[in-house]
Amino acid sequence: METLINGLHHVTTLAGDTQRNVDYYTDVLGLRLVKKTVNFDAPDVYHLYYGDETGSPGTILTFFPYGNLPRGRKGIGQLTYTAFSVPVNSLRFWMDRLHERNIPYAGPYKRFEETYLRFEDFDGMGIELVFTNDDSRTGWTNGRIPVESAIRGFHTVTLNQQNPDRTIKLLTENLQHTLVGEEEGRFRFKAGVGGPGNYVDVLHSPNDVRALQGAGSVHHVAFSTDSDETQLMIQQQLTESGYQVTPVQDRNYFNSIYFREPGGILFEVATNPPGFTVDEPISELGQGLKLPPQYESRRAVVEAELPKIILK
C-alpha cells in the first residue's frame, strides 16, 4: 500500500503577546524562527513558524499571536499537549533551564517507558519534553542551548476525547495510523516509519470539561504527505468516507486541506514541498516579513499594523 501519511507536519496555536511568544520559543526552548508571515485570512496578525534549521516537517510549531486574547481552556475536543523530543541525557539540563527561567513544570514522569516533563508557556499552551534516544534528527542550536540537549522536533501530540472510538477509526482507516500502545486510557498510534514525530496519542478523558478556544489553544494539527498527488488521494478517500474536506489551499510553503475529526479537532493534511526556502535562503530564514501575493501591494500598510519583533 502506498504511504500517504508520513506523520506530523505542524501544529498551529493561538497566542497573546507577539514579542513574548518570540522570546519564549527562540530563547527558552531554542527553536528557530524560520518564517515570519501573516495570517492569510487576517493580515493584521502575524503567522510565526518555529522549527529546526530548515523548518522540516515534523518540527514546525506555528502561532497566530492576537495580542490581548483571553486564555483558552484545555479539555475534550482539543489537542491539549504538544510533546517535543530531546535526548535522554539532557533531562538535568532541561530541569535546570526551566527552573532558572522560573517556569513551573511537573515530573519527571514515565509514559510508554519514556521519561517526560510537562509545563505550559505564558499563554497556557501545553508542552511536554520527552527524553528519548530513538530520534536521529539533528537539533537546531542558536548558541543558547548545546546541540546535544537541543529539541529534535515533535515527539507526540495528545488528543483529548470523550468518545475516542470514531477518532481512532479515522486515524486507522483513513490516515494510515497503527495502534502501537495502550496505557491508562491513552492509545498511541504511529504513522509511516513510526518513532518521534510520527506519534498521535488519543486520550480517553470522559470527565474533562469541554475545551474553550483562546490564547494557548491549539487551532489545528497538520499531518505530512509527500506531494500534491498524495494529498488529492487523501482528499478523495476522506470525502468518500463522509468527511467535509476543503478544497486545496495554497499556503506558499505547502498546500493544505482541512476537515474536522469526529471529536471536533481541526485536522489538516499538508504537503512537504515546496518548503520554507522557496522565498528565503536557509541562512536568512525568519528575518524578513514574507507576504502572500494578495497582500504585497499593501505591504506598507500591513507592516505598520503589525507589532515590531526583536530577535535577541
Image: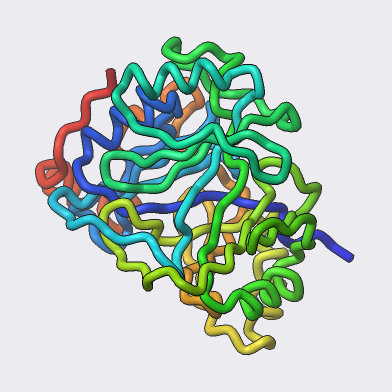
Using residue 179 as the reference point, say whether residue 213 is left or right of it. Answer: left
Considering the image in quadrants, where does the C terminus appear?
A: top left
Q: Position of residue 231 (x, y in %)?
A: 66, 66
> Residue 178 appears at what percent x and percent y?
79, 62
| Residue at the image point whose x is 16% and y is 33% from the top | 308
Image quadrant containing the N terminus: bottom right
Instruction: Using residue 307 as the reference point, say whether residue 211 is left or right of it.
Output: right
The colour scheme of the drawn protein is rainbow
The residue closer to the viewer here, 3 or 210, is 210
Task: State whether residue 173 is above or below residue 227.
Answer: below
* Between 37 and 143, the one nearer to me in the picture: 143
Residue 176 makes an appearance in the image: yes
Q: Position of residue 270 (x, y in %)?
A: 57, 58
Closer to the camera in the image, 111 or 31? 111
**Going 32% across and 58% down the picture, which residue do you hit?**
40
**22 left or right of 33 in image:** left
> Can you say whether 153 is above or below 160 in the image?
above
State the residue at coordinates (80%, 47%).
193
